[in-house]
Every structure is written in structure tokens, then in C-alpha cells.
Image (spheres, rainbow, N blue to C red):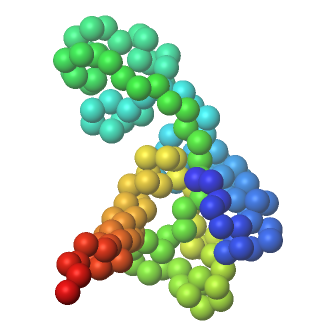
Amino acid sequence: MPVKDQTIYPRHWKQFSLYIRTERSGGKCEVCGVDNYAVGARDRFGEFRTEGSIHSLNSDVGLHLFGDSFTFKMSRIVLTVAHLDAEGDICRCQDETGFLCANPDHVKAMCQKCHNSYDRPKRNKNAKITNEAKKDANRGLFTEAV
């Protein structure tokens, strides 16, 4: 995922991230095991299928895996480094220091699907807070003048 706010990452983040995504993980998602830069699609069961394996499917198997229309969205896997603080509060480094940490025990290399799935509860919570704040800010706009 792109780094939105550079100020919350340690100076050596790029090197640390590269180490996690290549050396430690072996170039694979540490959750589902898909290879970095693989091209393919996920079937309706969530299994990642490479481009070559999709093209070799017969129509009956393809219909079973991808549904009635047998269409799929091809994508390229790009590993990212996920901070394990969304659930379980494994990492409190940002609360304590103001920076996201570069502790190998507090991160995992993840593909887009796994990273987004992991962060979803935190994003939903933040979206709810943001939407409530917007509603509160707009409440006074349409009051009647007395």
C-alpha cells in the first residue's frame, strides 16, 4: 500500500520493507502464500489461480471455480508490509513513540487481498467516526433562523 504520511514511518522503512517482502517472506504472502508479482485471478473460493492455470481449465471446471459467466479479473500480486495492530493490539509502538515501528515481530508481508482483509475492521471503524463527524459538522447548516 502506498505510504500516505511519510512522517510516521522510520527513516529506514524502505530497506526494512524490502527485507520483509523478499528475504523473510521468500517473496510470498505470509498469510495465503501467493507469490509476489504473480499474475492471475481469485476464484469464487478465494484461491489465487495463475494465468497459466486458468487458461488450462476445461469449461466445466472453470464454471465451477469462477461461476456461470466464467469471467475473472486478472491482477498482479504486489506484496506489502502490514502492521499487526488492527486486531489484538500486537503493536503499540505508534501510540508510544509516534512512529510505526520496524520490529519484524510486529509486521507481515501480505498480498493486497490479505492486507485489505486484515485492515478492514480498522478502516470500517475509522469510516464510521469520519461519517459521524461530517454529520455533526453539517447539522447546523440548515437550521431555521428565529
Residue 71, compared with residue 92, is above or below; it is above
Residue at left 71%, top 67%? 6
In the picture as drawn, the residue positioned furthest to the bottom comes out as 96
Location of residue 140 in the rendering, given as x and y in whole percent from the top left corner: 29, 79
- In the rendered structure, the answer to whether residue 27 lies left or right of residue 33 reads right
Q: Quadrant of residue 108?
A: bottom right
Q: Is residue 129 visible?
A: no
Q: Position of residue 24 (x, y in %)?
A: 66, 57
Count the numbered circles shown: 0
- The relative height of residue 38 versus residue 57 in the rendered view (above or below) is below
Q: Is residue 105 visible?
A: yes
Apparent side of residue 52 relative to residue 47 in the rendered image (left or right): right
- The quadrant where residue 132 appears: bottom left
Query: Which residue reaches farthest front?
Result: 146
In front here: 62 or 5?
5
Compare residues 27 and 112 and report the one nearer the observer. Answer: 112
Q: Is residue 22 above or below residue 101?
A: above
Give x and y (percent) for residue 91. 53, 80
**Residue at 79%, 60% in the rendered image:** 15
Please state the horizontal and vertical placement of residue 36, each as a whole percent of the image: 60, 40
Which residue does the image show at 27% across and 36% down from the upper left? 45
